Image (spheres, grey):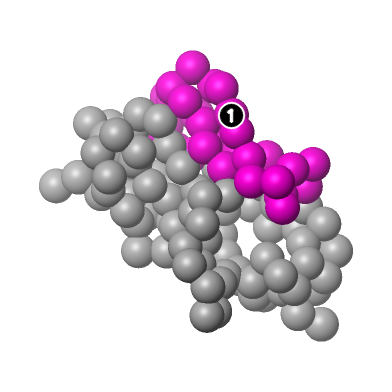
């Protein structure tokens, strides 16, 4: 059974940091993306990383978020610094070529 499982979400104050993890089944661990859906908004791409480590980011998170991966552990990470209330959303991991999504993890930025 192929799957993705996110973890690491939670409540953090503005300016704080969180690190999300997404553990994947080996067969679908390829180009990986982090997406988010904020209340009342469409789901959007946050960051993407290829198997070789090439990354791209949404303009809104550049310089604050870092995507990385550990191919030995079939895990992709999203390190989030300088969090803002606008970053509040459910964050999802996706295996891009297979279009498989994780269930999501809630990130809430609030004082």
The magenta region covers 47-76
Across the whole image, how many numbered discs are drawn on residues? Answer: 1
Tell me residue 61's x, y (percent).
71, 50
Quarter of the image where one finds residue 62: top right
- At a point 38% along the width and 47% down the height, the residue shown is 94
User: Which residue is rendered at x = 35% and y = 29% of the image?
Assistant: 30
Residue at 27 percent of width and 45 percent of height:
99
When asked about the image quadrant of residue 12, the answer is: bottom right
Task: Identify the element where label 1 is drawn.
Answer: strand
Report whether 45 appears left or right of 110.
left
Foreground residue among 81 and 72: 81
**105 shown above or below 46:** below
Query: Is 96 included in the stretch rendered in magenta?
Result: no
On the image, the x and y values in percent for residue 97 come to 29, 34
Q: Circle 1: is it few (<14), some (14-19), or many (20+) Cα within 10 Å?
A: some
Name the spot of residue 48 as percent of width and height, x first.
Answer: 52, 37
Residue 25, percent from left and from top? 27, 39
- Residue highlighted by disc 1: 55
Q: Residue at x 23, y 31 (%)?
A: 27
Say whether residue 7 is visible: no
Which residue is farthest top? Answer: 52
């Amino acid at each position: 059974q192929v799957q993705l499982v996110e973890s690491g979400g939670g409540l953090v104050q503005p300016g704080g940091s969180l690190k999300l993890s997404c553990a994947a089944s080996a067969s679908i661990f390829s180009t990986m993306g982090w997406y988010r859906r904020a209340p009342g908004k469409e789901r959007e791409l946050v960051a993407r990383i290829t198997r070789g480590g090439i990354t791209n980011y949404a303009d809104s998170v550049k310089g604050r978020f870092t995507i990385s991966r550990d191919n030995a552990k079939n895990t992709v990470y999203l390190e989030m610094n300088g969090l803002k209330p606008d970053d509040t959303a459910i964050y999802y991991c996706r295996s891009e070529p297979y279009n498989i999504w994780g269930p999501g993890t809630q990130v809430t930025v609030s004082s």
